[in-house]
Amino acid sequence: MANTFSGVEFGANLTNKDVPSTDSLATKLLDSTSLSVRIATVSAGALPFLMCHQYHPGVLAYFEPRNVATWPQLSKAGLPHDPPEIYDLDRFLCQSRRLARLFTQISLPSPSRGGFLTDSILPILTIESTCDETAAAVISDDGAVMGQCIATQEALHERFRGVVPEVAARAHLERILPVIDTAIRQAEVSPDDLDAIAVADRPGLAGSLLVGVVAAKTLAIAWQKPLVTVNHLHAHLYACQLSCESSVYPCVGLIVSGGHTSLYYCTSPLDLEYLGGTIDDAAGEAFDKVGAMLSLGFPGGPAVSKLAAEGKRDAYAFPRSMVHEKHFDFSFSGLKTAVRYAITGPGQQDFASLKIDPTIKADVCASFETAVVDVLVRKSRRALKMRHCKQLIIGGGVAANGYLRDQFHNAAEKDGFALTIAPPELCTDNAVMGAIALEKMRRGDFASFDLDITPGLQRGF
Ligand code: KG4
Ligand code: ZN
């Protein structure tokens, strides 16, 4: 279904069945580049190797945890050529890092050579693969979306009731090139028209991040473009700026996603001071786990939110952890346990076989959602007060929650602060928020080619 944002029509979100086969991928990519970028399907069942012969005689991008065939190029390039274990992620990481070292010998155009610091920047390609959405977008220098595509993996992870990192990495691998290709075609640009390739390199799942970073590096070599890195969390907050005509800075920024719940004081899109964050579950994770306990499918957030609208918000007195403490850390694991006890009582329980009355389900959802939002509102208000700040911005998947949006709007009216919540279509993971790369380019902040992933959260960044 087509959506609109910034006056540009986009849509074409891919589902599992839309993702083309590896062979048609190879043809597509060859069509869209004048250079010799090749995807070789190694053998039946093997995933693609992305190869570039223009600048290096051997393999430049080792795109796959399984090395199925013996490739003379692989051994020439000093890469392993025996098949590693399919599910050995450590080995995949280790091999990819070896490859990353090879990359250091390759030079990309520097900003000064490419003329990237002139007043006008050409469109950029942004790539997002930090968790379970594979996304790409083409963004013009004023932040307008020229094309974008998101391939969601929800259906793949549903039966596990959570994101399985190995499954996610493999799905990214299959989808990343058609997704990039779709975004570029939708934007009606050729690689020559692009000024840079931006990729989210942190934080996220290691295997997922690697797919995006290796794809970005490979295309950067093939198309001779500079690389820019995107901090996924900063990008979630930048989604708020994208919907505003005037600057939202300085502000307090709240990120509420599946992996993170944190407060920052932000003086610019790229200057963020960490105030505090969750010490256990993230808000979205708690929504997902409560959804799983109530057999509401995955991800649980939207389903819990829908049921909550029918329930009584004060039916259960769920805890509001650390709400009276002066710091800005959060904890949602106690709340999650309280929900569990409300459903089953203490002790082991097989949730799948539980028959829960629909009214109780709705009441649990409503009381749970109220407790989460209450904590988020109280802590954000206090952060604004402490920093004498009059602007709050909120991004991340949970920011799509209707009750959260209403409660924050009420608080803003009461306390007199300005509030910007990311537009719902930019709350969950997407590549449009990678437009933050334009801010880095304006500062001349480009990545070097030995770029590696940073999966973990670095506190303070
Ligand atoms: O930002 P996001 O797409 O991924 C991460 O960076 O983690 O956030 C996904 C999270 C999931 O936990 C999902 O359940 C939650 O956002 N979510 C919601 C809603 N929509 C998505 N949670 C509550 N209410 C919603 N309407
Ligand atoms: Zn996210």
Image (cartoon, rainbow, N blue to C red):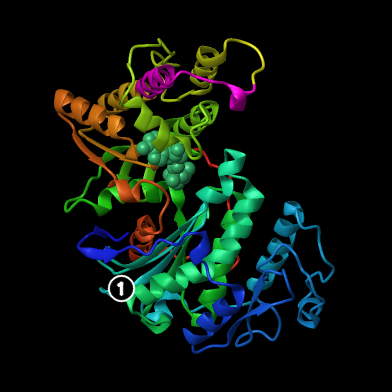
Task: Please give the range of residues in magenta.
Answer: 350-371
Residue 289 position, x and y percent, is 53, 30
Residue 458 position, x and y percent, is 53, 42
Residue 44 position, x and y percent, is 73, 73
Q: Where is 36 relative to 14, above or below?
A: below
Closer to us: 212 or 325: 212
Q: Amino acid at mark 1?
A: Ile
Tell me: is circle 1 under 8 Å from ligand 2.
Answer: no
Residue 247 position, x and y percent, is 21, 50
Which image quarter has ligand 1? top left
Q: Where is 342 relative to 142, above or below?
A: above
Secondary-structure class at tag 1: loop
365 in the magenta segment: yes
Q: Residue furthest right?
A: 82
Please give the name of the residue rendered at 49% of the width and 66% of the height, measured from the top-left corner: 18
Quadrant placement of the N terminus = bottom left
Seen in the image, is 345 located left or right of residue 323? right
Please give the name of the residue rendered at 54% of the width and 18% of the height, measured from the top-left corner: 340
Residue to which mark 1 is pinned: 121
